[in-house]
Image (cartoon, helix red, strand yellow):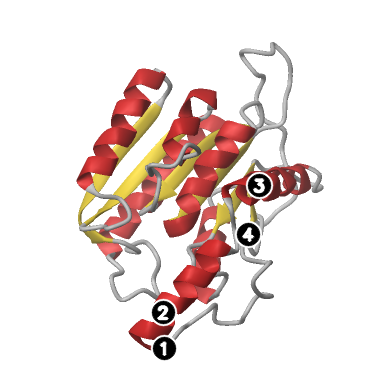
Amino acid sequence: MRPDGIGEFPGVVFLTDIWGIRPANIGMAKRLAEKGFTILMPNIFHRYSRIQPQGWKPQGEAETHTALQTLFGTLTAEQMVSDGLAYVDFLLAQKGVKPGSASARAGAQSNKVGVVGYCFSGQMALRMAAADPERVAAAASFHGGFLVTDKPDSPHKQIPKVKARLYFGHAVEDASATPQQIATLEETLRNWHGAFQSEVYEGAKHGWTVPDQAVYNELQAERAFEKLVELFDATLK
């Protein structure tokens, strides 16, 4: 997806929530493209299934639990990194994708992209920024889950490798991002000394940004969108 008109536009990798590509998040990506970005929306669960027109829509609590466990298992931390690097390669190779601004560290022109993840893919956005610090200039996570775990490769432990500007928009009452986990994430961010913002969206529950979710919160979704555009405008244009 890209804006109307001729020219080069900054590239953004748009990682969907765990229920995959469907009209609701396609609409979100198109709206972001209209703000002046070329958007790549990959099927991050390609090992599980081809794209389904309405995404994956399990029925009932038991089926939902089974589907979640299956989807979690189809994308490991290592695969998030390898797939993420491939997405960046592919996006930057497309005609009409604008190279980023000059790298302050390298002192030369270098290609830069942004990445945003929702739900399960919030951690993937962070892992991509850590794995490709010279090309990922900005990474955002909205209602991201499992950003802090007790595993050696926990996403938050990758932050020292990051050079990108980071944004985290957290949900309330989120079992995958508890207040204690958010506090650990923010302590790590402060010790990192990079550019970041991390905030909890009042009254917004996990999944609040996606229009087809029962917990969709239009007011807070608009705020999240404004924050995302602000982040990418500041780092990619």
Three-letter code, disc 4: Met
Marks 3 and 1 close (CB-CB < 8 Å): no
Three-letter code, disc 3: Gly
Identity of the residue furthest to the left in this view: 203
Q: Position of residue 193 (x, y in %)?
A: 39, 17
List the residue tagged with mark 2: 64
Taking 223 as reference, is 112 above or below it? above
- Counting residues from the N terminus, which is met first, the one under dot 3 or under dot 2? 2
Residue visible at 64% across and 44% down in the picture: 81
- Image quarter in which the C terminus is found: top right
List the residue tagged with mark 3: 84
List the residue tagged with mark 4: 41
Residue 59's disc number: 1
- Image quarter in which the N terminus is found: bottom right
Residue visible at 27% across and 57% down in the picture: 220
Taking 67 as reference, is 45 above or below it? above
Marks 2 and 4 close (CB-CB < 8 Å): no
